[in-house]
């Protein structure tokens, strides 16, 4: 019995160990070739999809949402400082709410006009593509070591706009299923999602701080932050809130309050940050390899023109959202230059979040296959093409960012 149990454990761990081995090799090669690590992983994953042997692990909404996003969101939020975010909060909130709506509507209109998709199918696709993906964005910023206001704007927007996209996505699926939804119901749903997330994140952070303040064991502190990352996410999702926003709240509260109140010693803080850096490395490595595997398995037959139209529509939608909203701050202290605006457009990558949402579309929904295929194609374009070309643009924009 024990031998059989050990065999089952070994078989379940083996695919993950194989993926981490591939990720490590890709990391070495990517560094030597000067290729972004995330791009190398996606290309390696696509190649693995055509091999006779490949890991029996598939990209799913449950894996991305329940396993990979919480640590990535928490680690990024833990590094965010409230003083810096507060100065740019108005622009970040506009981009993460109104910007998502504008981008979704413009993308949907272009898809309906160019490839004659039904308006609801186009709207679902537009919503999927409207939110910049925190996984892809954070990975790119880490690779180039970006700091300053522009990096803060890109990072904070990608962390916040998930709540808007998730609610809009659920509403659009409801329309397709024949539900009758009013504007008041949409506003209530969005407000409820945000309120539950903020409350869940605050409660979990409060409990974690209460316990951390009574120990100086760095191992316990690491364990508590891990529990807080997943606990806040699961608590909010259970009650219908945004898990990402809840984990963001918990991470920011712990990252800002614990050091200020002296809960972390210098050694403990260093160990904590190193541990979370390793956790996010594992999560990033796995998710980009799985994206590549999923891309390689997807059937794109007969949809090449539609996929090209999708990539164009998403970029135009992003442009129409970013430039006018940034123009509202042209004459104030929060002015953002054109170089930074271009970086916001081209550096707004799509990735695991869009794939997780599109894979959750019910099988019986009309137009599911073309929506899934085009979403996968645009994500591949975003990670590979934009990922390869956005690094010099981001670096240059960060150098000229004096705000």
Image: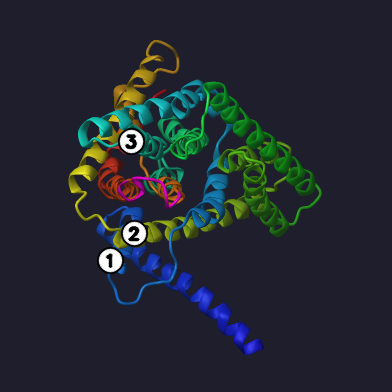
Lower sequence index among marks 2 and 3: 3
Q: Horizontal placement of 280 versus 400: left or right? A: right
Q: Quadrant of the C terminus?
A: top left
Q: Residue furthest right?
A: 214
Between 190 and 113, the one lying in front of the other is 113
What is the C-alpha distance between the residues marked 1 and 2? 8 Å
Up-down: is 367 above or below 281? Answer: above
Q: Horizontal placement of 213 versus 234: left or right? A: right
Between 85 and 349, the one lying in front of the other is 349
Dot 3 alpha-carbon crowd within 10 angstroms: few under 14, some 14 to 19, many 20 or more = many
Q: Horizontal placement of 2 versus 287: left or right? A: right
- For label 3, the residue is 122
Point out which mark residue 47 bears.
1
Between 151 and 96, the one lying in front of the other is 96
Q: Which residue shows up at 76% across the image and 44% down it?
A: 207
Chain part drawn in magenta: 362-370
Determine contact: label 1, label 2, CB under 8 Å.
yes
Between 327 and 107, the one lying in front of the other is 107
What is the C-alpha distance between the residues marked 2 and 3? 25 Å
Q: Horizontal placement of 259 versus 322: left or right? A: right
Q: Is residue 400 visible?
A: no
What is the C-alpha distance between the residues marked 1 and 3? 30 Å
Q: Which residue shows up at 38% across the image and 61% down it?
A: 289
Find residue 312 and report its image quarter.
top left
Q: Is residue 105 visible?
A: yes
Find residue 309 and report its image quarter.
top left
Dot 1 alpha-carbon crowd within 10 angstroms: few under 14, some 14 to 19, many 20 or more = some
Determine contact: label 1, label 3, CB under 8 Å.
no
Point out which mark residue 292 bears.
2
Q: Secondary structure at mark 1?
A: helix
- Image coordinates of residue 399 in percent, x first then y, are 34, 32
Q: Secondary structure at mark 2?
A: helix
């Amino acid at each position: 019995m024990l031998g059989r149990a050990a065999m089952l454990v070994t078989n379940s761990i083996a695919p993950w160990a194989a993926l981490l081995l591939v990720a490590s090799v890709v990391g070495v090669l990517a560094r030597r070739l000067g290729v972004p690590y995330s791009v190398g992983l996606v290309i390696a994953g696509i190649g693995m999809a055509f091999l006779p042997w490949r890991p029996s692990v598939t990209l799913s909404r449950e894996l991305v949402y329940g396993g990979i996003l919480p640590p990535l969101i928490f680690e990024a939020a833990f590094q965010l400082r409230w003083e810096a975010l507060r100065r740019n909060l108005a622009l970040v909130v506009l981009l993460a709410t109104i910007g998502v709506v504008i981008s979704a509507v413009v993308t949907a209109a272009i898809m309906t006009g160019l490839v004659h998709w039904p308006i609801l199918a186009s709207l679902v696709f537009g919503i999927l593509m409207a939110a910049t993906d925190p996984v892809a964005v954070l990975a790119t910023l880490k690779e180039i070591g970006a700091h300053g206001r522009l990096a803060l704007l890109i990072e904070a927007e990608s962390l916040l706009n998930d709540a808007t996209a998730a609610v809009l996505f659920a509403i659009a699926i409801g329309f397709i299923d024949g539900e009758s939804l009013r504007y008041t119901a949409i506003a209530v749903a969005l407000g409820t999602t945000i309120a539950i997330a903020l409350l869940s994140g605050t409660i979990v952070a409060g409990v974690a701080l209460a316990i951390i303040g009574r120990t100086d064991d760095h191992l316990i502190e690491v364990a508590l932050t891990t529990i807080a990352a997943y606990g806040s996410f699961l608590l909010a999702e259970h009650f219908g809130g945004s898990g990402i926003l809840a984990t963001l709240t918990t991470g920011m509260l712990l990252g800002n309050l614990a050091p200020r109140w002296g809960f972390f010693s210098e050694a403990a803080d260093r160990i904590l940050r190193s541990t979370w850096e390793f956790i996010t490395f594992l999560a990033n490595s796995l998710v980009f390899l799985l994206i590549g595997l999923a891309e390689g398995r997807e059937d794109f037959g007969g949809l090449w023109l539609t996929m090209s139209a999708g990539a164009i529509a998403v970029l135009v939608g992003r442009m129409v959202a970013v430039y006018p909203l940034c123009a509202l701050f042209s004459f104030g202290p929060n002015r953002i230059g054109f170089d930074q605006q271009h970086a916001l457009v081209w550096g707004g990558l799509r990735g695991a979040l869009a794939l997780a949402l599109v894979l959750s579309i019910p099988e019986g929904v009309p137009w599911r296959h073309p929506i899934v295929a085009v979403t996968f194609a645009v994500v591949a374009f975003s990670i590979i093409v934009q990922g390869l070309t956005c690094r010099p643009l981001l670096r240059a924009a960060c150098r000229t960012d004096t705000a």
